[in-house]
Each structure stands twice: as structure tokens, then as C-alpha cells.
Amino acid sequence: MGASDEEAVELCREWMRYLGATDAVVAAGESRRVCDLYGSGYLGWVENKRGNLEVELVERAAAVVAADGRQGVVFARHGVSPFARVRADELAIAIFWFDVQGGTLDGVNMLGRDLLAKAAASPD
């Protein structure tokens, strides 16, 4: 069973809050062309389509956060291509895999795993 793009974005907004972006909101209007989610410390992209997350989204996210200064996070509902994972590590973009039905989140790359571990260890 799937989730609509809007449902997936809303779920990932909650995950961004768990990661420490307590002010995370869903982008609207023109800002939605740049990213799906944003907060004071993070910009987030949600990939809800079937198939693997490819490197293009990782590189686009890296270009945006390089100019913006916030941490880039990408949430992928399905797989992640090996090249996208490696490139995300090189560009300091965190990648997470999310399960809509189970409501779980896993770090896919090194930075994603680190951010998730820090959130789990947080006393909040």
C-alpha cells in the first residue's frame, strides 16, 4: 500500500522534527520548486516514486544547500542507487529510507545514520 506524495511529505516533515528541525514545515507555492520541506537548520526533499533514488536529486540538493547553508536531507521511499549513496556522502547530503506503513526511518548513508543516531540519543 502506498501513500500520496502529500502524505509522504507530511510523514517526512514529522521525521525532520524528530531529527531536530522542530520548526520544519512543508514548502508551499514557489518554494516547493526548490525543496519539499524546510526548517531553520534543514532543507528536505522527499522521493516518493517507485524505483531507486538517483544521483540527480542528490546533486540538486547539494547545489541548493551550498548556496543556502542549511543541512540537506533526502527521504527516499524505495531504493537508493549505489552511486547516489556514494555521491551523497561526498556532498554531505543525508539520505534516509522511510517506510510509510511501518512508520520507520533508517539512515542510508553515513551522514543519514549519524543524524539518526544523534536524534535517538537526544533527551527530548
Image (cartoon, rainbow, N blue to C red):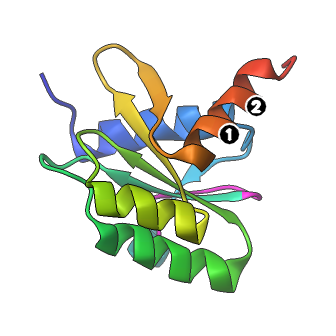
The answer to whether 47 appears left or right of 22 in the picture is: left
- Amino acid type for the residue under numbered disc 1: Leu
Residue 39 is one of the magenta-drawn residues: yes
Taking the spot 65% from the left edge, 81% from the top edge, the residue there is 66
Q: Amino acid at mark 2?
A: Lys
Which labelled disc corresponds to residue 96? none
Work out whether residue 84 or residue 20 is closer to the camera in this orientation and state it.
Answer: 84
Which image quadrant for residue 17? top right
Q: Are marks 1 and 2 in contact (CB under 8 Å)?
A: yes
Asked whether residue 71 appears in the rendered view, the answer is yes
For the residue pair 12 and 81, the one nearer the viewer reads as: 81
Q: Which residues are magenta?
A: 35-41
Around disc 1, counting alpha carbons within 10 Å, would you say few (fewer than 14), some (14 to 19), or many (20 or more)? some
The x, y position of residue 59, in whole percent, is 42, 76
Q: Position of residue 77 (x, y in %)?
A: 28, 39
Q: Quadrant of residue 100?
A: top left
Q: Secondary structure at mark 2?
A: helix
Q: Residue at x 41, y 68 (%)?
A: 58
Image disc number at residue 115: 1
